[in-house]
Image (cartoon, rainbow, N blue to C red):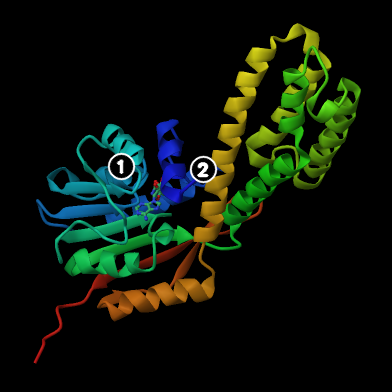
Amino acid sequence: MTAQGAWTSFWQAGGHQAAYSAGGSPEAVLRAHWTNTFAQLTLRPNERVLDIAAGAGVVSKAAMDCLPGSEHLRFHGLDIAHSGAIAYGTACPRGRAVVADAAALPFADESMALVVSQFGIEYASESAAAEAARVLKPDGYLRLALHYREGGLFLECAANRDAISALTQSNLLTITRQLFETHAGPGPDGKSRMQLLVAFNSASRVVADHLARAGSQVAGGTLLRLLQDCSHMVGRAQTFEPQEVLAWLDRTEAETALFARRMHLMCDAALDRPAADRLVEELKSQGMRLEPLQALTMGTHNPLPGAWIVQGVKGPPQNNP
Ligand SMILES: C[S@@+](CC[C@H](N)C(=O)[O-])C[C@H]1O[C@@H](n2cnc3c(N)ncnc32)[C@H](O)[C@@H]1O
């Protein structure tokens, strides 16, 4: 599944309002960050705001709520996923949804007064930073919150990714399928029902061991729920309609594959310090004047950095001799 396909399916399936939500709840910290950020900016009527990789527009909505005079500004939410743009249009009817790659923005040079992105441009290729700077007007504002490698959100995504990987390696869903496909007769490769039940028990143990290590609530409790559901269905196989179980397995396998892909994408997109420094240098080389890189801390029980905060303004145009 391509990255674009994974995001398209995610937003098609309704997504979460904030696509970074993978079980935890960093929304309040991020919302406070954006509220504070936007309250300090001054834009002129009719100026344009671009939210890159906007998803369902959580940042645009915060900007609409908090930017002084926002009712006179023009908002654009850009996303590579068509379904993301539809979600944006629904959530932010005042904004214009645009489907495009952040690495090739379909906007003129110096056409935006404010460019924002939350967990967005780091998914695109490296030229996305230069593109963000290109479309900013001189004195235009750049405000980014980027995935922080080894931070709280990253660790949560990595734990979710590993949980789905343990599920796949256990073959729990595959064996459950075989048990219901062969409800009335011998299994694949002549395996008897008894052999399949033995395999099911050992697959269940693999998943239970992973849950014991990672915690029962890993992946938002999905792994535990799947183990319980499969055990329940296999234990009371006579009371279930095989076709219904097989249809449930089809849906479950598709959903877990999509979830795993999204967790991989989020982990891969996260920036360590050298990568964040490179992004800052790239932006500076495009004429951005940036504040020192900061980390935004998230989580109440175990506060950890969750996002790199990159912010600054575009310098005046260079005078070519
Ligand atoms: C983690 S979500 C963040 C969405 C939103 N900014 C938020 O904070 O809720 C990442 C978004 O980036 C989009 N995306 C991924 N690659 C992209 C690219 N190359 N260009 C534009 N958008 C991209 C995805 O479709 C998805 O909506």
SS of the residue under disc 2 = loop
Q: Quadrant of residue 23?
A: top right
**Rendered view: 267 above or below 82:** below
What residue is drawn where x is 27% and y is 64%?
132
Q: Dot 1 corresponds to which residue? A: 61
The answer to whether the beta carbon of the residue marked 1 is less than 8 Å from any atom of ligand 1 is no
Precedes in sequence: disc 2 or disc 1: 2
Say left or right for 40 vs 292: left
What is the residue that sits farthest to the top in this orientation? 239
| Labels 2, 1: front one | 2
What residue is drawn where x is 90% and y is 27%?
195
**For the residue marked with disc 1, what is the amino acid?**
Lys
Q: CA distance from mark 2 to mark 1?
A: 17 Å
**For the residue marked with disc 2, what is the amino acid?**
Ser
Q: In the rendered image, which quarter contains the C terminus?
A: bottom left
Say left or right for 225 vs 15: right
What is the residue that sits farthest to the front in this orientation? 190
| Any part of residue 198 in sight | yes
Task: Decide which of 222, 117 is in the foreground and name it.
Answer: 222
Task: Decide which of 303, 198 is in the foreground and name it.
Answer: 198
Say left or right for 148 vs 56: right
Say left or right for 193 vs 48: right
What residue is drawn where x is 69% and y is 9%?
241
Q: Residues within 10 Å of mark 1 (few under 14, many from 20)?
A: some
Q: Dot 2 corresponds to which residue? A: 21
Task: Decide which of 46, 207 is in the foreground and name it.
Answer: 207
| Any part of residue 69 in sight | no
SS of the residue under disc 1 = helix
The answer to whether the beta carbon of the residue marked 2 is less than 8 Å from any atom of ligand 1 is no
**Rendered view: 157 above or below 207:** below
What residue is drawn where x is 30% and y is 35%?
86
Percent x, y of residue 260: 59, 44
